[in-house]
Image (spheres, rainbow, N blue to C red):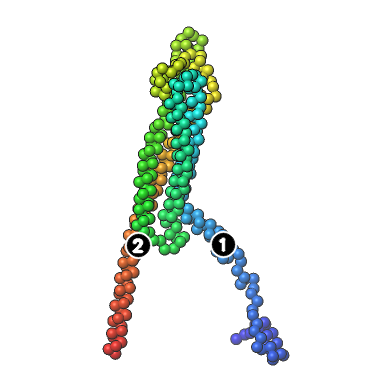
Amino acid sequence: MVNSRAEMEIGRYHWMYPGSKNHQYRPVPTLGDRAGPLSSPGCFECCIKCLGGVPYASLVATILCFSGVALFCGCGHVALAGTVAILEQHFSTNTSDHALLSEVIQLMQYVIYGIASFFFLYGIILLAEGFYTTSAVKELHGEFKTTACGRCISGMFVFLTYVLGVAWLGVFGFSAVPVFMFYNIWSTCEVIKSPQTNGTSGVEQICVDVRQYGIIPWNAFPGKICGSALENICNTNEFYMSYHLFIVACAGAGATVIALIHFLMILSSNWAYLKDASKMQAYQDIKAKEEQELQDIQSRSKEQLNSYT
């Protein structure tokens, strides 16, 4: 074998200094032997695994739900306050005539606070449930096991989301009512502003009676606004803001319905996944038990053969 120059130098050193043979020389690592920070698993691989564990469908549904609820609650709250101001200033000057309506609107504003708080928590819970039931969590945390309690909770979320979806369909339909009322008033004002009727005597005969919508009683005064007075109402900032805010609130309610339908599909898929996982877990347990019994039989048979020999 051909010795390298380094080994020859070490042998020469030992021949010149015999007492140094017991000294242990540790090889100096070369640059190729040193592990760089990029050669070992680092932040990039961890980020890839973390991104693989994100339930993107639940995340999109949560963002859509938060956005829809925020639009409905925020815009609806301000639009209701503007509606009360319009009624008090123009359609019902007597406070006792719209006292019941004011109490109902105030109650609805408190309900809006409750809806916003509830759906903030419910959206976070559904997002967490999506994290723990996605298949990527199985890859991140190793062996995946489900219990009957977990499947029951998933089934409960499916039922609750279905009920909330049906309820929000009603909210979406109810939020379209003020949009319809304000649209009728706005379209009437557009007729008054049109060149065919503007400046003619028939303008004062074009009226809007909000009593026919049932929001104020029939004995409310004046209750009906006609002609130029109605046009002035349409030009106010309260009317413009309330009309457009009701439209945005209705759109927010529709977005919330879509988000709940999306959540319902996700939860149903997760529940089916948990059900299949539980069946696979039971099959693996039975298979492991049978293999253990087979190994026990084989070991006993070998012991008996050894005892005969």
Please identify the quarter of the rendering in which residue 279 is found.
bottom left
Give the number of the mark in front: 1 or 2. Answer: 2
> Given the image, on which type of amino acid does mark 1 rest?
Gly
Can residue 24 be seen?
yes
Image quadrant occupied by the N terminus: bottom right
Distance of label 1 from label 2 (alpha carbons) = 33 Å
Please identify the quarter of the rendering in which residue 65 is found.
top left
Label 2 sits on residue = 281
Q: Is residue 150 above or below residue 112?
A: below
Secondary structure found at label 1: loop
Task: Compare residues 104 and 202 and report the one nearer the observer.
Answer: 104
Task: Compare residues 240 and 216 and report the one nearer the observer.
Answer: 216
Mark 2 closeness class: few <14, some 14–19, many ≥20 residues within 10 Å: some
Secondary structure found at label 2: helix
Q: Is residue 257 above or below residue 32?
A: above
Q: Position of residue 109 (x, y in %)?
A: 47, 33
Q: Position of residue 102 (x, y in %)?
A: 46, 27
Image check: 299 left or right of 204? left
Question: How many marks on residues?
Answer: 2
Can residue 184 be seen?
no
